[in-house]
Image (tube, grey):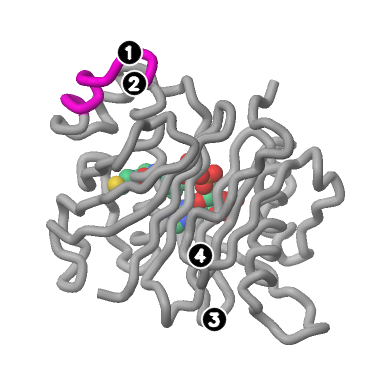
Amino acid sequence: MNAAPRGQDFPSLFPLNVGFAWCDQSEDPGARLLPEENALLGLTASAKRRRDFTLGRCCARTALARLGHGEPGQAPPPILRGEGRKPRWPPGIVGAITHTGGFAAAAVAADGDYLGIGLDLERLGRRTQRLSRKILRPEERLELEALPAEKRDTQATVIFSAKESIYKALNPATGVYLGFQDARIALSGPPDAAEGALNWRLCKSCGPALPAGFTGEGRYARRGDFVLTAVWVTHP
Ligand SMILES: CC(C)(COP(=O)(O)OP(=O)(O)OC[C@H]1O[C@@H](n2cnc3c(N)ncnc32)[C@H](O)[C@@H]1OP(=O)(O)O)[C@@H](O)C(=O)NCCC(=O)NCCS
């Protein structure tokens, strides 16, 4: 059962010059891929993969329209795939897609405004202790252990999600692989707040413009059993 409450969709967590869209499969049963996107999926994709990929692409198109991308009346562009599973955005655009459990979100912006933006949706209750050890840096683990037991899973999930958002924001621009120990996340408030700010710091260099120690900002939000994080990186 999905526990993302109806009527409480996630808001945009980004600055106003970022286009954002959220969708729920039950509200968009007519979601369709463009033919070029359909070809990317191939014939062997599972029904779940097809659903998530379709919702993600539909959200991305809505986010592009909200950003004011394209001419009125012009057909929307397909969002193809770059190396690995990176989305290949239309020229001049950076963005990110996330999907899980029949929900999806996408965010896009002009590449003159941002080096990259990242977005990640996670469901609570999936971070086992073993996974938390892999995901959290030692100082993040100490902070987690200082929290009341009932907040720890949410804290670990927000940190995990923020790290995936950072990866989605930086990897397309830099090509550098970042592991979960390569960024430090600090939340400005309780992890189970409806919405809050976060700060992050790179612990590994992603090139001369993004050295270890580089810091950035982001936000997180919680609705029901889901956590959404967003990060944005302006040009250094
Ligand atoms: C790539 C990754 C971040 C995707 O996250 P996920 O929780 O598995 O899946 P989500 O649904 O949130 O996101 C999937 C979307 O991410 C996008 N994506 C995939 N690889 C990407 C990359 N290298 N860069 C940017 N976006 C990427 C795609 O759009 C994908 O959806 P699609 O295949 O339908 O187009 C994750 O699989 C991964 O490899 N993580 C390890 C690296 C990491 O996070 N390190 C932490 C650094 S601090």
Position of 227 compared to 78: left or right? left
Which residue appears at 22% of the width and 19% of the height?
145
| In the rendered image, the vertical position of residue 144 relative to residue 175, given as above or below | above
Q: CA distance from mark 1 to mark 3?
A: 46 Å
* C-alpha gap between disc 1 and disc 4: 35 Å
Under mark 1, the amino acid is Ala
Q: Are marks 1 and 2 in contact (CB under 8 Å)?
A: yes
Secondary structure found at label 3: loop
Between discs 1 and 4, the one toward the N terminus: 4
Pinpoint residue 189: horizontal percent, then vertical percent: 32, 37
Figure check: 3 above or below 63: above
CA neighbours of label 1 inside 10 A, class few (<14), some (14 to 19), many (20+)? few
Look at mark 4 in the image and give the residue it sits on. 95
Badge 4: how crowded within 10 Å, few (<14), some, or many (20+)? many
- Residue 193 among magenta residues: no
The residue to which callout 1 is attached is 149
Label count reads 4
Residue mark closest to the camera, 2 vs 4? 2
**Quarter of the image where the N terminus is located:** top right
Residue at x 13% of width, y 58% of height: 212
The label shown at residue 91 is 3
Q: Quadrant of residue 156?
A: top left
Report the amino acid beneath label 3.
Pro
> Magenta includes 151?
yes
In contact (CB < 8 Å): disc 2 and disc 3? no
Q: Which mark is residue 152?
A: 2
Question: Of helix, strand and loop, which one carries label 1?
Answer: helix
Nearer to me, 187 or 137: 187
